[in-house]
Each structure stands twice: as C-alpha cells, then as structure tokens.
Amino acid sequence: MVDRRSYLKLTGGALTAGIAGGVIALVAREEGGGGGAATFEEREIEYDAHDDPSDVYRVWTGYPERFAFENGRAYTGETALRCDIPEGDSDGSNAMVWFPDDGYDQPRALYQRAMISLSDDWTMEETDVCRFWCAGLNTEAGVQGSGSRGRPHGDDGWSSMFAVTDREIDDEAAYNLAAYSYHMDQEGISGEFEVVGAPVPVGKWFRFETLVRMNTVSDGTANPNGEVRCWLNGTPVYERTDFRWTTTKDQAIEYGGPLVRYGGDETAPADLAIYYDDHELRGNGAIEDRRESDPYVEDSSRMDDYDGRITVATGDAETSYRVYVDGYVVHSEWSNVDGHTTTPNETVEIALADDTEGYATADAVAAPESADGYLYDGSVVAVDADPELAELWVDGQELDPAAVPSRPGE
C-alpha cells in the first residue's frame, strides 16, 4: 500500500522524463514485442458505436454470451458493457483488447482507465474472490499465466489481474480490492494473491486505472523491475516494482481489459453482474503524455445514489482541511446547493478507509471565499480545518464548524 504523497516521492525523482501521480513516463524501454507490424499507442472504446462486444474485444473462454451491451446503465452515453455471473456458477468470460489481432506489437507498457460498477445487489460469501480486470496478460507464449499450472519460467506466459474479495473487510456496502499475479517468483502454483485493502463500493461507478510495465531483460535474465500500479477514483492504492515476468523481449502484453471469473472453487451466491464503460488504453510512447491522475469528480446528477452530501466553505484566507467519514467519500461539484457553487479542487486527496485507521478522509487546500463539495456513504465524524471554516453543511443542514469534532472520538 502507498499513499498519494509517498507515491509521488518514490517516483518523481527517479525518472528522466518525469511523473506526477498518474502514469509513469517510459524511459529507455523497448517499444514492443511479439512480432507485430505496428506499435500500439492509444484507443478509446465507444460502446455506443457498436452492436456487440466482439466488435471491439476478443470475447472467449468460459461463457462468452455472458458479456453483452446494455442500454440505460451507462456511465456516459447510452450503452455499458455487462457481464453476468449466474448464481451457482463461477465463469464469466474474457472481453479484452487483443493487440496482435490488429497487427500491433505487444506493448511493453500499458495504461488502462475505465469506469466500473458492481451490480446493486452484489454480494459475496466470506473469503470469496471475483476477478474483474486484466491489467496485462500473455497466453501466446504459453499457459503459465493462469490455471494453477505453477510458476512461469519467463517464456511461457504471465498475468496481472485485479479482483474484489470479502477478505479482510466487514462492510456490506463494499468489498476489498485484491491483486492477483502470475510471475516468476511466486511461491504457490496458483499465482500470488494480495489483498490491497481498498474498499470497492457496491452499486456505484468507480474510476479504475492500471499501469503495467514489463521487466527489462539482460543477457536472457529477467531483471526484477516489472511494475504494476493501480488507482481507485484517482487515489493510488497499489504499487509494486519488483516483478519478473519475462526473459525474452518477444513476450510482452498481449491482452488487457475486462476479465470476469468468480472463484477458484467458489461459486456466486446470487445472480451478479459487473458493468464497464469509458474504457481507454495507452501503450508504449503514448503513456509519456499521461501525467497526473486527476481527482475523481462524481457527477452531481448521481447525488441520490449516496447517503448524503458535504459542503465546506472558506472565509477570507486559504484554508487546509480534512474531512473524516466513517464509510466512503468522493469529490463532487454542484451549482446552488447549500447556497454555494462548488467546482473541482485539484488539491483534493481522498484516502480510503483502510489507510486511515478505519476512516475515509478528504484532504484539500481551498482558496479564500471558495466552496468544495463531497458525496458520501456512512457518516461524517469529524472536520479539521486551519483556519476555521466559514461554513459547513452536511445533508442540507448548516453546522457550526467550531462545534464539530476535529478528530474522530473527540
């Protein structure tokens, strides 16, 4: 786990081309592998423009028919991608961009960004796991990237996936994020599973970003510098820079995108679904144009999807503040709510609950005579500000900032 500030500190001074919190710049890396004719740079997938998921993805394994486009559930536009997992089953399917299919080299670095939502009635049994995202995968070189076949050898497949799990969390409204990787140094036959400790909300769209960067190879030896990074609603939640996946430049990133499987051995306890929208991909040199992962700003039209709202308003001085929420919080903007117009504040940093001893926090530096807005689930437990806020509104009620605890438990 790494917070936003330590992430910037760790990466900012180490890269020649620079970085600011979002996506690492490529420095002295090979452009691609796998023998394709073209170098993949970028793609933005517009579901509204297509009739079937197979128009934009390779849909295979499991039950391909469980992936479908659905109108009326989109984050933007009209159409979202939906994958069903029926009660008592484990397989969904894969619906991923297959780079060789369009004649591309396999990229050696891949950034992806998408809006994702678990269905409103999503539920899991204790310890269950459901994979929902592939940050990077290679099957062309071999089958060691999945299927409990043991440790990859550097020339026979690898993978980096993300899942939701009921492990290490006690919250019916959220499940933990987990990383699941097949790599050359894994200890078990079934890859390496890491509970990230970042709560994924049920029934709400969240912005999910991943970055994979292949390890370098020296004289046929894999160097331990393969990278995986992940952001949830703009907050860096996973960072690892010691992976060894490949001993050859010909094995790189063959696939990326939606991948759904419930279990291992477990099966879905109810009819479940996962939704996707606004899938973007950047590869190789195009990643150099990606910088700060902007704070996620929830559309105010989704205000009714949350338990409540918070408006903080400053006086005549620049103000630093922290809002503590026992639950889940996102930045938002609105016009004429609680007597204020709020706009996105680029300094906002959201820390998820497990990073702050059980409380989600929103930290920001606000300009004089300004207002910031938030939507939340759970309860607001404290607000700490310096100097004191001019106004504080919670769920449409104005509170006296001086009477609100500055720390949980006060």
Image: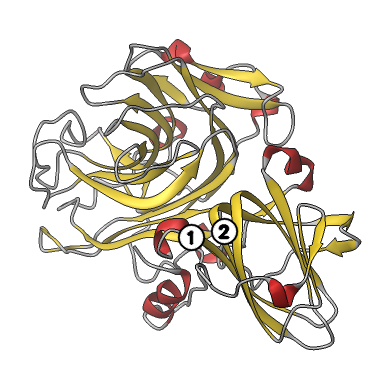
234 lies left or right of 71:
left
325 lies left or right of 149:
right
Residue 333 at x, y = what percent? 78, 57
Badge 2 marks a residue whose secondary structure is strand
Residue 137 at x, y = what percent? 31, 39
Alpha-carbon distance for marks 2 and 1? 6 Å
Placement of the N terminus among the 4 image quadrants: bottom left
The quarter of the displayed image where residue 128 is located = top left
Chosen colour scheme:
secondary structure
Residue indicated by mark 2: 325
Q: Is residue 288 above or below residue 301?
A: below
Q: Is residue 167 above or below residue 61?
A: below
Graded by Cα atoms within 10 Å as few (under 14), some (14 to 19) or many (20 or more), the crowding at tag 1 reads many
* First along the sequence among labels 2 and 1: 2
Residue 162 at x, y = what percent? 36, 42
Toward the viewer: 379 or 72? Answer: 379
Residue indicated by mark 1: 359
Residue 398's tag is none
51 lies left or right of 371:
left
Badge 1 marks a residue whose secondary structure is loop
Q: Amino acid at mark 2?
A: Val
Q: Is residue 409 visible?
A: yes
Q: State the residue at coordinates (37%, 67%).
A: 2
Residue 80 at x, y = what percent? 62, 27
Q: Is residue 71 above or below residue 186?
A: above
Badge 2 vs badge 1, beta-carbon distance below 8 Å:
yes
Q: Amino acid at mark 1?
A: Tyr
